[in-house]
Amino acid sequence: MTETRISRRFADCAAQGRPALVTFVMAGDPDLDTSLAIARALAAAGADVIELGMPFSDPMADGPAIQAAGQRALKGGQTMAKTLDLVRRFRESDTTTPIVLMGYYNPIYVRGSEHFVAEAKTAGVDGLIIVDLPPEADDELCLPALAAGLNFIRLATPTTDDKRLPAVLANTSGFVYYVSITGITGSAVPDAAKVAGAVGRIKRHTDLPVAVGFGVRDAMTAREIGRNADGVVVGSALVAAIAASLDADGRATAKTVSAVGDLVTDLASGVRAARAAAE
Amino acid sequence: MTTLSNSLRNGPDDRGFFGIYGGRFVAETLMPLILELEKAYEDARVDPSFKAELAALSTHYAGRPSALYYAERLTEFCREKSGGKFGAEIWFKREELNHTGSHKINNCLGQILLARRMGKTRIIAETGAGQHGVASATVSARFGLPCMVYMGAVDVERQKPNVFRMKLLGAEVTPVTSGAGTLKDAMNEALRDWVTNVENTYYLIGTAAGPHPYPAMVRDFQSVIGTETKEQFFAQKGRLPDAVVACIGGGSNAIGMFHPFLDDASVQICGVEAGGHGIDVENGHAASMTGGRPGVLHGNRTYLLQDDDGQILEGHSISAGLDYPGVGPEHSWLRDTGRVSYVPATDKEALDAFQICSKLEGIIPALEPSHALAQVLKMAPTMDRDKSIVVCLSGRGDKDVFSVAGYLGETM
């Protein structure tokens, strides 16, 4: 696999003896300019990888926090063109932090997969996570994305057994996103011991870094989960921090960007303590 | 298969596609279960004991076969409209006479037997008008399984009698407030439940949509409608009908009626979508094939109501059972091949047909098949008197009397 921003970043973190902190926010939540400021604040506060949600009207795998974030973004007029523009603007001042777009297939499908991956690559996107495209549908977007030089990051879940794992991992690149629970985003806190076992199981099948998400909400869980994972993903907690900072009409306030930055600073200390705590 | 290479009834392919439509666009958490479901269904459909149990329940519990009835006065009404010169015979396939009052029981009986066979201990379902919710609650009661029904909060309000019916049957009804609080949002919430409780839960999808194998499986369970129609019509007239008509939301009663006739080229097939306030009113209808374009939602590729950025629109229909922004994938394929014509009927046309049918035939139809009746009222007067149309009367209208009263400005 050729080197990418994602592989370089995971290698850097591994060299520092710590897991990567992967952060998720919704593009355009609560508005485009604030969203760009948040993305910059994430990187400044210690996020190693940034996942940007592409808002969709029907987020079937998301819990209430991320559903609401998508609704705020759509209400604020967010479109796919604006999401790509956000990445372009982010890249003007940051050429090293990997950006992964995450979402559902339909807004990409209507744009045309080939067209979309070319646009995304040009804008400075490094990878894609598309929730409703299992490996059985690789010809839809995964293969065009790989051909365009984008990583295609696949979700593995507790229901992905050893028989199925090779199929799930076959065209996966960048990293593997292990969903720590069967459920929607932002639900239960994962059981660290079970997660460690699952990460070990996946690593027997691949050399890719394994990041763990769903249910990580503070420095303590980040530290716990990070002991045995190459990356820790935090999404709903950040999105909830954004929601809590908004005014009564759902608009950004002076606290919005700093609320996210403060939480990420805390989470970054968590992942940095992960291995130290294990030893 | 060799003799049927030109058949329109061979779909889907082994990846679940009808042409470009269908497929399995689901989260990885669900994928292993979808594959397990496909295998369980493949085993069950050829198992004589499964077929025998379903047949016995269909006869003694659901009350099949449902009647095929010649609607004499409605036929006369259309003949008078044409000045007596034209006017095809109008026949009703009386699915509203089934236990629970609609065609939904056909599918629910099949799927509950499958759920039991797979060892699942909890049933979830989505519902729009409440007909599928009631049928799901019914079969769950019959087989002693707990049932959770997701229903849009707006639909809970406009379909109160069915909500109470589900509760009487022991089901739990969860109003869904996300989105516009209608059928698509109920389906999103059911999918979220399924992803969370995938180990023990069976998702009893009510229409011929969703990830493969649901569209094919629901079609197979509903095809009893068309198969019986063919036999019953032949017994009465010694030939095939000239046209079959059914309403389309997700399209389960329609595909059940149409599928057995697909290879009979002499039979005109017509699906009727919800035209709402009119096809030219933006977001004012639920006619995904007339006014939408292909996209991916709820596990399948199909025609969808959506904006230019791929965001799904809510759609509108007077009927809670039809205001879904998508349609079963096999219908999308049949539309593109041209075998079936899909046309809209507006809220007003459906409301008129609802009243005409009630007064002339003594049958109060549900608002959903009232759309199909509206199309029949347009078609029949243009067809020769020796022609025959069979319309699928998919449900009875008791559940709709309150909302119809509201539309007509009556207070009850």
Image: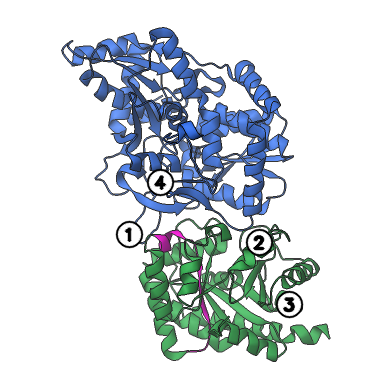
Chain colours: A green, B blue
Q: Which mark is residue B397?
A: none
Name the residue type under label 3.
Met
The residues bearing labels 2 and 3 have C-alpha atoms spaced at a distance of 17 Å
How would you rate the neighbour count of disc 4 (Cα within 10 Å): few for under 14, some for 14-19, many for 20 or more?
many
Disc 4 designates what residue? B325
**Residues drawn in magenta:** A95-109
Name the residue type under label 4.
Pro
Disc 2 designates what residue? A187
Marks 4/3 same chain = no
Residue, far front: B2
The residues bearing labels 4 and 3 have C-alpha atoms spaced at a distance of 43 Å
Disc 1 designates what residue? B308
**Left or right side of B78 for A198:** right
Say which element carries label 4.
loop
* x, y percent for residue B84: 18, 10
How would you rate the neighbour count of disc 2 (Cα within 10 Å): few for under 14, some for 14-19, many for 20 or more?
some
The residues bearing labels 4 and 1 have C-alpha atoms spaced at a distance of 15 Å
Q: Which mark is residue A220?
A: 3
Asked if disc 4 and disc 1 are in contact, CB closer than 8 Å, the reply is no
* x, y percent for residue A41: 52, 85
The residues bearing labels 1 and 2 have C-alpha atoms spaced at a distance of 32 Å
Name the residue type under label 1.
Asp
* x, y percent for residue A162: 73, 61
Asked if disc 2 and disc 4 are in contact, CB closer than 8 Å, the reply is no
Q: Does residue A175 appear in this view?
A: yes
- Does the stretch in magenta take in B319? no
**Left or right side of B80 for A88:** right
Say which element carries label 3.
helix
Q: Chain of mark 4?
A: B
Q: Is residue A40 above or below residue A212?
A: below
Marks 2/4 same chain = no
